[in-house]
Structures are given as C-alpha cells and as structure tokens.
C-alpha cells in the first residue's frame, strides 16, 4: 500500500515528502477554502514539491462545467489528477476525461456500486471515505474490502483504491488489510504511524546503558 498526504499545508507537506515515503497528495475544496490562498497558487506550490499525482477537486457539479473545469486544472501541471464526485454527472465526466487521458480521482465514494461505476468509467483512483462511514457507526474497512472484491473479480478494471477520510493509524492498518492500493493521510496521522511507546522506551534504555558504559 502506498502513502499519499491529504493536505494543502505546504509547511506540513515538506517534512513528510522528505521522508521519500509520500508518493502523492490529495486535496479537497474545504481544505482549499481553509488555506485562504488562491487555489492556483496552492496547486502550483504542491505540484512543484511533489512529483507524484496531486488530486484537485472540481467545484462544478454539471457535466459540461466539470469537464471544462477539469481541463483548466489538468493544464496547471502534468501531475494534477482531477477529483470528481461520484455523482451521475461526475462519473459521466470521468468517462470523457478518461478518453482524453486526463487522470481522475472519483471521490466521495460511500458504496461499492459507486466504486464499480467509477472504475467502469475509467477512473484512475476511487476514494472511499472510511472515516465518514465510521462516523455513522458503520465499518469503513468493509467498504474497502467490498470494492477490492469487485475490482479483483474483473481483470479489465484498473482503478486503484485510495482509502481516504482516514482518522488515525488504525484506519491505515484496516485499509491495508482490506486491500487498499493507497491510503491518504494528514501529516499528523502520517507522523503517528512511526510512534510506539515501547520503541521510545527501548531507545531511551539503549542510550542510557550506552552512556553508562562510557563512564566505566
Ligand atoms: O480529502 C478527502 C478526505 O480525506 C476527507 O477526509 O476527514 O474530511 O472526512 P475528512
């Protein structure tokens, strides 16, 4: 499973990218709004920092406008992936963009059938929102496992499962076990993946023992 970062915060992005473990970035309109910066500037900054795919979501909701906006976004940088919602018009636009070789991330996915439609329409990625499903008392990991089964049963489907709306390290592990190809996490969740109290305690003891031996 690959790791993408779910953020528009350039300051938080840089240290994670420097690990060499971050292979892409995802964004959404809420994050863009919170950045209080022109979207074009944010996109160009991220695309210059990350060589991998950078997902940027359209605001338009009707087919014609989605396609027009997607062309504008795709023209900003060669690694832009256009995010479209898994609506009737969004998936129709996905089909058109696929025919034009513009990569699409089909987002706001909450059902296996939405994921199947997105894959049939040629989406490069589908983003099932694990956290928001768990927030409803259901199991986000089960959605990912169902999508994995549907995709594996049809060798013609090439869409990658990009687990999104990840709240914590447990979601990352659940996504991996359920068969996600990619997980997108906030910089905070990414950093938490390294942490374990016994690792910290063990390192502290190693260094303490080493230092004590230097004094004898
Ligand atoms: O950016 C897509 C997804 O990761 C959003 O997550 O936390 O708003 O449910 P969240």
Image (spheres, helix red, strand yellow):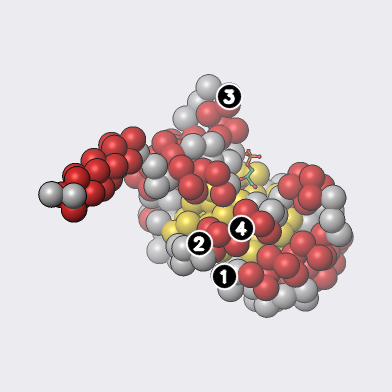
Q: Nearer the viewer, mark 3 or mark 1?
A: 1
Residue at 61% over, 58% down:
13
Residue assigned mark 3: 136
Can residue 178 be seen here? The reply is no
Residue assigned mark 4: 13
Tell me the CA gap for discs 3 and 1: 32 Å
Q: Nearer the viewer, mark 1 or mark 4?
A: 4
Q: Residues within 10 Å of mark 1 (few under 14, many from 20)?
A: some
Q: Is residue 50 left or right of residue 212?
A: right
Tell me the CA gap for discs 1 and 4: 13 Å
Q: Are marks 1 and 4 in contact (CB under 8 Å)?
A: no
Q: Nearer the viewer, mark 1 or mark 2?
A: 2
In x, y percent, where is residue 6?
61, 51
Residue assigned mark 1: 52
The secondary element bearing badge 4 is classed as: helix
Residue at 19% over, 45% down:
212
Q: Are marks 2 and 3 in contact (CB under 8 Å)?
A: no
Tell me the CA gap for discs 2 and 3: 29 Å
Residue at 81% over, 65% down:
41
């Amino acid at each position: 499973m690959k790791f993408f970062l779910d953020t528009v915060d350039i300051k938080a992005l840089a240290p994670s990218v420097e690990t060499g473990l971050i292979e892409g970035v995802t964004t959404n309109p809420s994050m863009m709004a919170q950045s209080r910066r022109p979207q074009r500037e944010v996109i160009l900054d991220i695309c210059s920092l990350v060589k991998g795919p950078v997902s940027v979501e359209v605001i338009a909701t009707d087919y014609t406008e989605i396609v027009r906006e997607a062309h504008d976004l795709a023209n900003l940088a060669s690694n832009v992936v256009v995010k479209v919602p898994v609506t009737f018009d969004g998936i129709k636009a996905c089909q058109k963009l696929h025919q034009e070789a513009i990569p699409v991330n089909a987002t706001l996915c909450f059902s296996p059938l939405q994921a199947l439609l997105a894959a049939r329409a040629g989406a490069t990625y589908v983003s099932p929102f694990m956290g928001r499903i768990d927030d409803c008392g259901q199991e986000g990991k089960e959605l990912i496992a169902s999508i994995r089964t549907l995709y594996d049963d049809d060798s013609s489907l090439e869409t990658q499962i990009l687990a999104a709306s990840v709240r914590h390290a447990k979601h990352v592990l659940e996504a991996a076990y359920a068969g996600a190809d990619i997980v997108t996490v906030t910089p905070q969740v990414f950093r938490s993946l390294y942490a374990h109290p016994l690792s910290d305690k063990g390192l502290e003891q190693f260094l303490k023992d080493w230092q004590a031996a230097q004094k004898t």
